[in-house]
Image: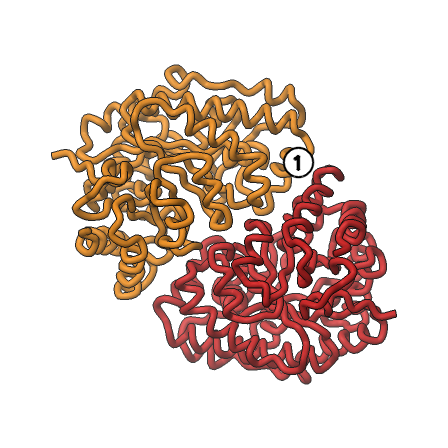
Chain colours: A red, B orange
Amino acid sequence: MFNDLFLRACRLEETERRPVWLMRQAGRYMESYQRVRREHSFMEMCRTPELAAEVTLQPVREFGFDAAILFSDILVPVEAMGVEVEFVEGTGPVLGATIDEEADVEGLRVPDPYEDLSFVLDAIKILRKKLEVPLIGFSGAPFTLASYILEGGGSRSYERAKSVMYNEPGIWKGLMSKITDTVIAYLNAQIEAGAQAVQVFDSWAGALSPEDYRAYALPYSKRVFDSLRGDVPAIHFGTGTSGYIELIREAGGDVIGVDWRIDIGEAWQRIGYDRGIQGNLDPLALHARPEVLRRKILSILEGTGDRPGHIFNLGHGILPTTSAEKVRLLVDAVKRFSPL
Amino acid sequence: MFNDLFLRACRLEETERRPVWLMRQAGRYMESYQRVRREHSFMEMCRTPELAAEVTLQPVREFGFDAAILFSDILVPVEAMGVEVEFVEGTGPVLGATIDEEADVEGLRVPDPYEDLSFVLDAIKILRKKLEVPLIGFSGAPFTLASYILEGGGSRSYERAKSVMYNEPGIWKGLMSKITDTVIAYLNAQIEAGAQAVQVFDSWAGALSPEDYRAYALPYSKRVFDSLRGDVPAIHFGTGTSGYIELIREAGGDVIGVDWRIDIGEAWQRIGYDRGIQGNLDPLALHARPEVLRRKILSILEGTGDRPGHIFNLGHGILPTTSAEKVRLLVDAVKRFSPL
């Protein structure tokens, strides 16, 4: 019995109840994930289709989520572009690109996903045979990936990324174009391999002013959404973008994912009801007492009303310190209290 | 000749042009500040009235800002509450409080600013004799200070602060009340010593959902604004709060300070024109080429229209890597292009 609740909600069709899945649901908070992780490095897990498929399946089996999201990392295609990526325990990713002039951008390649990222496509194929819920493929958005490359990792102030953006239009446009081409080819290959929806993560878009988002990021994200093939729904997720969710919508996506820094009912109204909405529980709410957590879940269900098109999720990825018990409570509460 | 542009803008009175000052304008980007800093530790500078006054004056003298903000740190009153605070080069502040039960909160004191923080008041008195622009006093908001205490420093996910907030109402309320009492006494003493305006920094409020801000932070911030004595304007500044600036306004403040993640014209409209607005240039815009920087300044001047009550500022503190040349360009552009 295939559970298509999630896909129907993406298409704004009526559903018996809200679909629920969590960003980074295949992760360190799970004992079963930890067992795999102890034997393999993070990148090894990303690169081995059987392992990636296995950890993708775990949370669906254990918690009954209504969708699976492919286990991978947004830097996987960046590495395939020719950038060295290392995951340093406790620090996060460290990237080895030096982009000082336009020639450095020319040195990056647009990977052929069928050649260079076939392990991702293979994981998707394995998963489609095993899953009874929709499989979501994903990619980082151009701005977020460009920032990673230019900053060499995570950033507080995006000093290098913004300096290039403002002062080196040739480098910025070249890099963003190349990343955009990469993302489009990558997502379309995922769709062809069997991804039934895709999510574009612009996790760092919130570093930008609305004006800068419109000038330096939106055109590239828009090209991604406009170039997606097939009839699969696309989710557009950003954090820190409460000030300009209208622009996130303008860039594209059938469903807009919002973080918890905005009332979800208000967000949906601003985005428009011709789009679905995904979110937006604070991941830290899973550290709250059951009665507080339950109240917060109800508040999101009530805030989105009885209109079809809401997909329950967190406002950002689940934290490693989350207890599985609370995740169970969440899934149970959404399923129990959300019949439309 | 006393320049009262800033105070008149705070009171929504007509001004010949927009007043301009920058958050953290007394800081490491200045050569003159660095010279003082090389001889003294950061906390020594905060605690020595003559040094604090000197670095407060420097940017006003060098760049012609329309207001001075007292050189200090939001953790100064926290230290006076009995919490060990250490500034670790490159890491930021490390706080030594252990708040595990209500008794730990009882162990904290509400400092008497006239006894415990007299060095701040003395700096204010020195400055009032020397300044020909208004002097702004300041404090952190209760939520931001409570988070610092509970997290022991900066934080990414506010795991500890939110866990206490959700799960230990006794500790949370006790701690927030004590901090609120501290902030009120501290700000009122600054006003009595001569501060002509005060700014309340809720730099971390953006970690909260609107619902949580309303439940766990707003009542305490509101009590601060409601308890300010004297007829001095209060500025209420938050970052990451674009999703609920209406609540920031509801908590209080004659002027609302916004970060760059929202269009300032839209922000003012949402806040209401019976309040002033301060902001909101991205600090990284000061790393942009002159023509890009100038365009961004003009866009803020145009976005706020010809209504009195706009104070030009950044959307957050100026970065240490900023060039003094660009600061000069900014001040010059605001003064030249903003006549109403």
Q: Quadrant of residue A167?
A: bottom left
Q: Which residue is mark 1?
A: B166
Q: Relative to residue B238, is residue B66 drawn left or right?
A: left
From what the image shows, is residue A271 above or below residue B264?
Answer: below
Residue A11 image offset from top left, x and y in percent: 68, 70
What chain letter is assigned to the residue under label 1? B
Q: Residue at x 73, y 69 (%)?
A: A7
Residue A53's spot in the image, x, y percent?
79, 69
Callout 1 amino acid: Tyr
* Tag count: 1
Examine the rendered structure and indicate whether residue B311 appears above or below residue A276.
above
Q: Residue lying furthest right in this view?
A: A1
Density class for disc 1 (Cα within 10 Å; few <14, some 14-19, many ≥20) is many
Q: Nearer the viewer, residue A215 or A160?
A: A215
Residue sitting at x 35%, y 21%: B189
* A252 relative to A190 in the view: left or right: left
Q: Quadrant of residue B107?
A: top right
Is any atom of residue A75 visible in this view?
A: no
**Which element is circle 1 on?**
helix
Q: Quadrant of the C terminus of chain A?
A: bottom right
